[in-house]
């Protein structure tokens, strides 16, 4: 038992049953952040298959990154060809570059360029 963060009454979790917030937002099951179990399972599998950073080769603090952001292409959120294993340093450098920061090594990797090209080619009708 711990105190509710709203009223202070003891409860089984962060909120007591009376103060428990209701979440009414619509959920898209294919969005990575809205299906954390699926993402965690895929991320573990990819980091086990490739236990080093695609950019620098580090084996410390690995994460899985979307080459083309899931916000831009949610249909590629779980496609392994759109995912790469990066250490947190390279992932942060890449995120900074895509958000207007200084481009780093992660963005100039030949593998990343090839994978990005794979998903940005136009499909014929």
Image (spheres, helix red, strand yellow):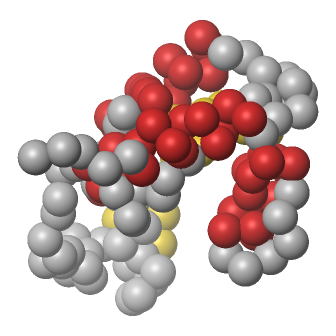
Q: Is the residue 116 above or below the residue 50 in the image? A: below
Residue 64 x, y percent position in the rendering: 60, 38
Residue 34 x, y percent position in the rendering: 30, 56
Q: Quadrant of residue 101?
A: bottom right
Seen from the viewer's position, the closer of residues 10 and 76 is: 76
Q: Is the residue 54 above or below the residue 113 in the image? A: above
Seen from the viewer's position, the closer of residues 23 and 124 is: 124
- On screen, residue 38 versus residue 5, left or right, reads left
Q: Residue at x 73, y 17 (%)?
A: 51
Q: Residue furthest front?
A: 124
Seen from the viewer's position, the closer of residues 24 and 69 is: 69
- On screen, residue 35 versus residue 45, left or right, reads left
Residue 9 x, y percent position in the rendering: 38, 78
Q: Quadrant of residue 77?
A: top left
Residue 62 x, y percent position in the rendering: 73, 34
Residue 52 visible, this orientation: yes
């Amino acid at each position: 038992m711990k105190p509710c963060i709203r009223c202070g009454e003891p409860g089984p979790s962060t909120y007591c049953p009376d103060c428990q917030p209701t979440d009414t937002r619509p959920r898209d099951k294919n969005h990575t952040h809205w299906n954390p179990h699926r993402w965690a399972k895929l991320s573990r599998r990819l980091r086990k298959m490739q236990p080093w950073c695609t950019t620098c080769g580090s084996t410390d603090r690995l994460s899985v990154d979307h080459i083309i952001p899931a916000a831009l292409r949610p249909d590629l959120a779980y496609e392994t060809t759109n995912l790469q294993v990066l250490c947190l340093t390279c992932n942060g450098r890449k995120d900074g570059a895509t958000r207007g920061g200084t481009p780093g090594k992660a963005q100039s990797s030949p593998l990343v360029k090839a994978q990005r090209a794979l998903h940005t080619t136009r499909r014929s009708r």
